[in-house]
Image (tube, rainbow, N blue to C red):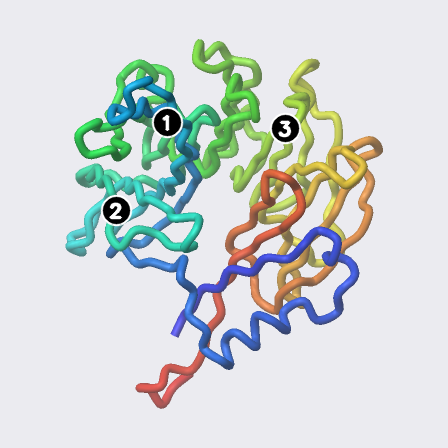
């Protein structure tokens, strides 16, 4: 049986704790349910947050006061692929209740994509839309709202298709914090950075890696870090459009994911999730010298997902682990 786990840890405890998985194992032993877990009937390959701030004019009020309400949504994508599995390919929008820490029982919106499997998504920082990668191209979906239903919807737009058609499978998509630049990393190893929304090319690097697995913009937008399926991570200076640093792996490390963040003294820091013979580890880098600060093994299995909270206080990772099936005599 293959199971998935998601673990959170504060940044302060990353290099301090010797048994950071203790709470996780206790939760497994006690079988504590997670109220924020929900199944929607399709395998999911990407997920992202949408924070929707709505200015609602209170119609019941005579003075027409405006109330500012914030709604949280989760955009996810996945499906059964091109085969006849009976599992649809779809992009989903679910609502999230922050007070109850719970997802909606069913998606508030579902857009089926026929035989095309949506593999990676990037939500624009202003919540205006979602970019989604498919086996051969990328598509832009504008985000709107059905007023009578008070829920988000997605509408396919053709304004970007000519520039993102026939580019092959993109394994990673990311916007910078301001939403003024888009980066796309391909299965073929090509790395592209565009101005947004003009789509003027900032960087077009063929063979940046054998295959681009993940990428991320620095908080100030000056740098882009990328990791491939082998070799070092690379840091790109988007002003000079050159590689400013190659971050070398040690021993048997294989870099998997990369995320910039901000330290307690407001300096930028880079985290890279790596696979090793001992399990999954988090490597920390100084972004002024691009030297390795430290490394910590955080889980005995390979890390399959990695993220950092917007305020930089928490790291989160997901991983798969294999257990004995209670109905099978084999492992």
Mark 2 surroundings: few (<14), some (14-19) or many (≥20) residues within 10 A: some
Q: Residue at x 15, y 53 (%)?
A: 84
Instruction: Check the image and report above or below for 194 versus 283.
Output: above
Viewed as shown, does residue 106 lie left or right of 71? left
Q: Nearer the viewer, residue 230 or 43?
A: 43
Number of numbered discs on residues: 3
User: Measured from the top left, where is residue 287 in percent x and y?
Assistant: 77, 34
Q: To which quarter of the image does residue 268 belong? A: top right
Label 3 to label 2: alpha-carbon separation: 33 Å
> Which is more N-terminal, label 2 or label 1?
1
Label 3 vs label 2, nearer the camera: 2
Residue that carries the numbered disc 3 in the rendered image: 224
Q: Quadrant of the N terminus?
A: bottom left
Q: Which residue is mark 1?
A: 54
Instruction: Report, in whole angstroms, how far the alpha carbon at label 1 lies from the one at label 3.
Output: 32 Å
Q: In the displayed image of the protein, which residue is found farthest to the front?
A: 62
Measured in 3D between alpha carbons, the distance from the residue under mark 1 to the one under mark 2, in whole angstroms, is: 20 Å
User: Residue 246, position in %: x, y?
Assistant: 73, 35
Disc 1, SS: strand
Query: Which one is earlier in the sequence, the residue at label 3 or at label 2?
Result: 2
- For the view shown, which residue lies furthest in the bottom direction? 329
Q: Residue at x 63, y 39 (%)?
A: 311
Specify few, some or many for label 1: CA neighbours under 10 Å numbering under 14, 14-19, or 20 or more.
Answer: few
The quadrant in which the C terminus is found is: bottom left
Q: Secondary structure at mark 2?
A: loop
For label 2, the residue is 107
Q: Earlier in the sequence, mark 1 or mark 3?
A: 1
Q: Residue at x 42, y 82 (%)?
A: 324
The image position of residue 256, as x and y in percent, is 58, 49
Quarter holding residue 159: top left
């Amino acid at each position: 049986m293959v199971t998935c786990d998601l673990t959170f840890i504060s940044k302060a405890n990353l290099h301090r704790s010797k048994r950071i998985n203790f709470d996780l194992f206790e939760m497994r032993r006690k079988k504590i349910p997670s109220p924020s877990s929900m199944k929607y009937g399709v395998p999911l390959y990407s997920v992202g947050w949408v924070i929707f701030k709505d200015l609602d004019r209170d119609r019941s009020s005579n003075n027409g006061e405006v109330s500012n309400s914030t709604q949280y949504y989760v955009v996810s994508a996945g499906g059964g692929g091109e085969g006849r599995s009976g599992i649809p390919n779809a992009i989903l929008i679910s609502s999230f209740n922050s007070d109850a820490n719970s997802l909606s029982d069913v998606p508030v919106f579902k857009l089926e994509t026929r035989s095309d499997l949506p593999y990676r998504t990037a939500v624009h920082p202003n919540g205006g839309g979602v970019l989604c990668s498919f086996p051969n191209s990328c598509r832009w979906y504008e985000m709107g709202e059905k007023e009578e239903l008070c829920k988000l919807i997605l509408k396919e737009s053709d304004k970007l298709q000519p520039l993102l058609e026939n580019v092959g499978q993109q394994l990673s998509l990311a916007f910078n914090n301001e939403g003024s630049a888009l980066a796309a990393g391909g299965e073929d190893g090509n790395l592209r950075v565009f101005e947004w929304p003009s789509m003027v090319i900032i960087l077009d690097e063929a063979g940046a890696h054998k295959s681009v697995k993940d990428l991320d913009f620095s908080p100030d937008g000056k740098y882009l870090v990328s990791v491939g399926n082998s070799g070092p991570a690379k840091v790109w200076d988007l002003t000079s459009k050159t590689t400013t640093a190659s971050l070398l792996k040690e021993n048997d490390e294989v870099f998997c994911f990369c995320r910039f963040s901000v330290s307690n003294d407001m300096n930028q820091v880079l985290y890279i999730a790596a696979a090793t013979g001992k399990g999954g580890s988090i490597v920390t880098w100084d972004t002024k010298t691009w030297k390795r600060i430290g490394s910590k093994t955080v889980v005995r299995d390979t890390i399959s997902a990695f993220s950092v909270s917007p305020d930089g206080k928490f790291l989160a990772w997901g991983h798969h682990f294999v257990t004995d099936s209670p109905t099978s005599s084999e492992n």
